[in-house]
Every structure is written in C-alpha cells, then in structure tokens.
Amino acid sequence: MQERILGRTGLKISEIGFGTWGLGGTMWLGAEDKESLNALHRAADLGMNFLDTALVYGEGHSEQLIGKFLQEHTGPMYVATKIPPKNMGWPARTGTPLGKAFPYSHIIESTEKSLKNLGVETIDLQQLHVWLDDWTDAAEWYEAVSTLKSEGKIRNIGISINDHQPANAVKAVRSGKIDAVQVIYNIFDQEPEDDLFPVCHANNVGVIVRCPFDEGALTGTIRPDTTFPHGDWRNRYFRGDRKQQVFDRAEKLRALLGKEAATLPELALRFCLHHPAVATVIPGMRSVRNVEANCAVSDDRPLSAAIIRELRHHAWDKNFYSEPD
Ligand SMILES: NC(=O)c1ccc[n+]([C@@H]2O[C@H](COP(=O)([O-])OP(=O)(O)OC[C@H]3O[C@@H](n4cnc5c(N)ncnc54)[C@H](OP(=O)(O)O)[C@@H]3O)[C@@H](O)[C@H]2O)c1
C-alpha cells in the first residue's frame, strides 16, 4: 500500500482509505456487522490506515463499529468523521445562515458524541458535513473548531464539500482555516481539477476523494435489472432509467480495460489516484472481497497520459443526488 501526505495535517495516510457510510446500516441496507469488522481488519492487514465516517451514518452505528474495531486493532489508524448540519439540510442551500447549520454548541456537542462513539480521546480529522463558502468569514464555526483543537479533542478540521460543487470551498481553502477537503471526484465528475485542486495544492490542503465509483455506477455492477433492498437509498439515486444510463456508460469504459487496469473498479480508482493533489481515495466497502480488490490497486503504476486523455471523453455532467424527478 502506497502512502501520501494529507496536506498540512502532515498525516501519512494510505492512498486507499475506507469509506464507511455503508456500515451504518440505515441508508445502505444489507451490511452485516461481522463482515464489516472482518473487512476493516482485512483492510488494515493490507496497509489501509485511514477511515472516513460520520456521526449520522446509521445514527452513530458506523462510528460505534469503528470504535469496536479500534479496540481490537493494534497499529496506526487515522479516523476522520463529520459533524452533521444542525438543520439536517443536505446539501447546504445558498442563503442558509451559518447559525442554522453549525452553531458553536452544536459543533462541540456533536464532536463529544463522536469521541464517545469512537472510544477515542482525539479525532484525527473532524469535518463539517456540508459547506457554503459564504460561511468562511463567520466567526462561530472557527471559534468552536479552535476550542476543540486547543482542548486536544480534534487534531485537524476539514470540509466535506456539497455534492458536485467543488468550487464551493475554494474561499475556505484560501482562508488558511481548514486542513483538508473531501470532494466527489471520479471519471464522471472531473470538475475538481479545474478550480479546487490547484488551490488545494497551492495552500497545502489535503484532498480526500469520495464516491470514486459514483455510488457503484462506475464498477459496472449496476445493470438495468439490478434491484436494491426495499428502503435502500439507491432506489432513489438510480431511479427511472438511470440504471440503463449508467450501464451504457460503464460498458463504453470497458473498451479501455487491459494492461493498465483489468477491471472497471480498478480503472475508476486509478483515475482518482492519478492526480497529484489527491491524498487518498475512500471507496465505500462492506466486504472482504471488495477490500482485497481495492487495496490491490495501490502500487506505483500510474495511468498513462494516453488513457487519461481517453477518460476525459467519459466525463458526465449530472447530479443524481438532487436533480428533480
Ligand atoms: N457528503 C459526504 O460527506 C459523503 C457522501 C457520500 C459518501 N461519503 C464518504 O465516501 C465514501 C465512499 O462513497 P460511497 O460509499 O457513497 O460510494 P462509492 O465508493 O462511489 O461506491 C460504493 C459502492 O461501490 C461498491 N464497491 C466497492 N468496491 C467495489 C469493487 N471492488 N467491486 C465492485 N463494487 C465495489 C460498494 O459495494 P457494496 O454495495 O458491496 O458495499 C458500493 O455499492 C462513503 O462510504 C463515505 O465515507 C461522504
């Protein structure tokens, strides 16, 4: 497993990290705690040392499971979690006052809950789960973060950027107040390369890439007849003819498979890793099988410029999270 430095946090983290939304068990259905724990241990055995979770994932269940894993695990493991907006508004809507989403007391109380769930004294990276760049100069969030840092409850602060709005953190990155950003970046959404990555590079702000598979679309496993358990949030994400659309797009990508990437998940991860601004990619994983496949991608064989040029043609401007029906 190759490691990279997460910007000014100085943390030396595995370039494949572990996305744990699915372990929460409420929005992604079908996770088994025993298999989730096995997957976490297998990933650690393979050199993974960075986990991303959030207080809301399974209403604390993902964090609690990680807490259990951390008790059993010996060795370095860096944990990033997130503070939900107090108004539970995803994404943060333009014009929302900071005080509705991240008042001082909410930042402190949410962090206390996460520390308890995780069973740790310090969170390596605390993140705000939504963001509006208009909030950059508001004093309240930064005072709360400074208090948590001075008390040793968090080491670093990051922003998890609203879906498909990579430029909506550029001001915060430039302000020098944040240490890392988490952003959607994948073969379909290559937009972070335009404005966000250069400014992160210039300010030494670490980049965590989420949704490398566009919620599974880029793995090629979503077929027109794929079904999800009743109540699983992907029934909405892949509604209407979207399964057919993503299947057609993934099939076109198969033409690029070969020596540089043997499978679609490998191609998707290698695309994310090719960019030097990226510190780690956090695929969502719930099984030992996926952990083994994804960790195996980390080596020192970057995709060639020729294949990256080809992948430019596969960018797809869409927002399945919030486009109306
Ligand atoms: N707003 C935010 O801050 C936010 C939003 C979304 C995600 N995140 C973070 O980012 C992480 C990653 O995003 P995500 O989980 O939403 O989506 P993702 O990583 O794009 O896709 C996850 C899907 O890919 C599948 N998968 C993983 N490895 C595979 C492989 N090798 N072969 C085939 N399928 C594979 C998973 O399978 P299974 O179904 O078998 O598990 C799951 O269905 C999350 O877990 C979370 O930590 C943050």
Image (spheres, grey):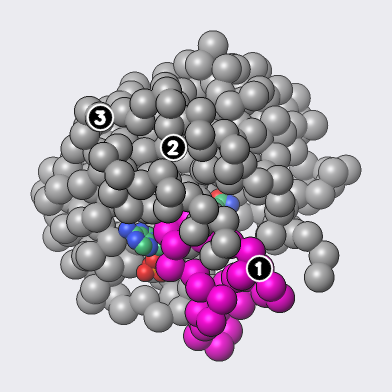
Q: Is residue 192 left or right of residue 91?
A: left
* Residue at screen point 63% across, 64% down: 245
* Residue at screen point 59% across, 38% down: 313
In the image, 196 versus 86, the foreground residue is 196
Task: Determine if residue 274 is in view.
Answer: yes
Q: Which mark is residue 242?
A: 1
Q: Is residue 177 above or below residue 23?
A: above
Mark 3 — residue?
A: 301
Secondary structure type for disc 1: helix
Q: Amino acid at mark 2?
A: Cys
Q: CA distance from mark 1 to mark 3?
A: 33 Å
Q: Is residue 14 above or below residue 229?
A: above
Percent from the top left, x then y, of residue 113?
47, 58
Percent from the top left, x then y, of residue 305?
42, 23
State which quarter of the image contains the N terminus: top left
Q: Amino acid at mark 1?
A: Arg
